[in-house]
Structure formats: structure tokens, C-alpha cells
Image (tube, rainbow, N blue to C red):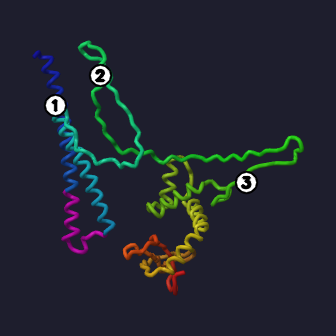
Amino acid sequence: METADLARENALLKARLAEVEATLAETQEANRRLQDILHAAQREKFGKRSEKLSPDQFNLPLEDAELAQGVLEAAQEKAEAALQRARGRRPQAGTQPRASPPHLPRVERVIEPASTLCPCGCGEMARIGEDVSERLDVIPAQFRVLVTRRPRYACRRCSQAVAQAHAPEHVVPGGLPTELFIAWIIVSKFGDHLPFYRQAEIFKRQGIDLDRGTLGNWVGRACFHLMPIINHMKAHLRGADRIFVDETRAPVLDPGRKATKSGFFWAVVSDDRGHGGADPPIVLFHYAPAGAKNIR
């Protein structure tokens, strides 16, 4: 081997060594983070009461542990692949991922090699098989504007008869949102716990300027139209064989007041599935100010 070849190989090995050392440093940092999280968990379990975390606070380091574990695994995989390349070997495939949900649609892409001509000059190579992998993908939320056109028709002979379809009714007459958009806002707030101000920030990233007051107004209008369903659910609860009620106290600041007062959130549940009942479960939430005698 000539001097020039040795120099190139030496430079290549140094570059790969630097890559391995950088990956090792990332792995050590991820391991240190996991140790910190483990100590926090031990303090939560065995430490003094004053040192313990609330359940919500404790969920944060648990999520951090999962994140750090992912960083550690990725760093280890990267280090192993770098070592395999340094030894002139083909990196081994990683662990088999869990199966993708079968109900999701499949979008296939085929990646062909740059050339299918045999290097020895025999001509076109024959297909003998394929490797197939599946990865979970997502299409980010895409906003659109629904344009409704209502053509008008008139008789050219008498010029008196005019025909046009009636405008559809909406939760917000003459407003901006469709009912599907309002339903999405409601699910995001009450199902996914996204406050209006956070939703407004998400919309702003899409170039849509909506303040939380507007979102609250739309949801309030939707709640008015949902009252017949809510009243039917209340009637079903009143006739249930058994109901479960939970009360949660909450501070309330009324307009014009400097001090807060107490209010109560009530969760009222009917669920007879565990007792052989066929009716669907119902959950209703109700707010009542302090001193309220009953839940209506």
C-alpha cells in the first residue's frame, strides 16, 4: 500500500473515530439524564414528604425518562453503526418495530436502484424479491375555506320567476366557521385539554388570526344548540338505577370582585355496564356556586 493510500485510510479512520467519540459523548449525557430522573423517582418514593412531587409534577420526569431513553437508544444504534462501518461491515438492522395499525390506509412508494444493468455486461437484471417496511406517517392538519355558491335562476320570458336554494343554517350565522371546525375546537379543548389561547397560537402558525375570545364565543353558541341533547342526557340520568357523583371545589373570580369565592364542579356519571346494563354510559359536568342547594 502506497503512502497516499495510507494517508487516505488514516484520515478516514480518524473521521470515523471522531464520529464514534461524539456518539459516545451523547450516550453518556443521555445516561446521566436517566440517572437524574431515577434519583428523582427514588426521592419521590422514599424521600421526606416535603421533597415529594405532586402527581402532575411527577409525570414530567417520567415523560423525560421516556424521551431520554429514546435518545440513549438512538445514540447506541448510531455508535454501533459507526463501529460496523469502521470495521468494513454492513450495519445490522435494528429491532423489529411493532406492527402498524391495520385499519389505516397504506400509501406505497417503490425505491428502485440507480441501475438494474448487470455490472458484468449480461444485460438487465431480473427481479428476485423485495424488502418491505412500514412506518407510521401523518398528514398535518390542513385548513381550508369552504366556498358555498347558490346560483340564481330567472325566467327570461316573464322576468318574474326567480329560483335559488335557501342558505344553509349555521351555528354562527354569517360567521366564519363551519360546524366541523367548531366541533374540532370543542374536542381540542375538552377532549385534548388545549385551552383556547393555545389553539389560537396553533391557528396563528397557519396564518389564521383568531383570538381566544372568538373561539369561546363560537363554542358558547354551539353549547346553546347542544342543550336538547344535554337535557335528554339529564333525563336519562334522573331515571338511572344508580349514579355516581364527584364534587371538586374551585376558586371563582367574578367580574368586579377582587377576592375569589368558592364554586363547585360536579361530575355526574351513569354506567351500568358492570351490572349487566345495556344503556350506554353517560357523563355530565355541572358547575354550581357555593351554597347551591341542588344540581339542575
Along the line of sight, which residue is nearer the eye, 39 or 96? 96
Q: What is the secondary structure assignment of the residue under circle 1?
A: loop
Determine the residue located farthest toward the top in the rendered image.
Answer: 121
Determine the residue located farthest toward the right in the rendered image.
Answer: 158
The mark nearer the N terminus, 2 or 3, is 2
Along the line of sight, which residue is nearer the eye, 50 or 105? 105
Q: What is the secondary structure assignment of the residue under circle 3?
A: loop
Name the side, left or right, on which 212 lies relative to 64: right
Q: Could you say where residue 29 lies in the image, as x and y percent from the top left?
A: 21, 49
User: Disc 2 marks which residue?
Assistant: 126
Q: Nearer the viewer, mark 1 or mark 2?
A: 2
The numbered dot on residue 166 is 3
Magenta stretch, main secondary structure class: helix
The mark nearer the N terminus, 3 or 1, is 1
Along the line of sight, which residue is nearer the eye, 113 or 18? 113
Q: Residue at x 22, y 54 (%)?
A: 33
Residue 256 falls in which quadrant of the image?
A: bottom right
Q: What is the secondary structure assignment of the residue under circle 2?
A: loop
Badge 3 crowding class, 10 Å Cα cut-off, few under 14, some 14 to 19, many 20 or more, is few
Q: Which residues are magenta?
A: 35-54
Q: What's the distance in space between the residues labelled 2 and 3, CA to CA? A: 63 Å
Q: Residue at x 79, y 44 (%)?
A: 153
Q: Nearer the viewer, mark 2 or mark 3?
A: 2
Q: Quadrant of the N terminus?
A: top left
User: Disc 1 marks which residue?
Assistant: 89
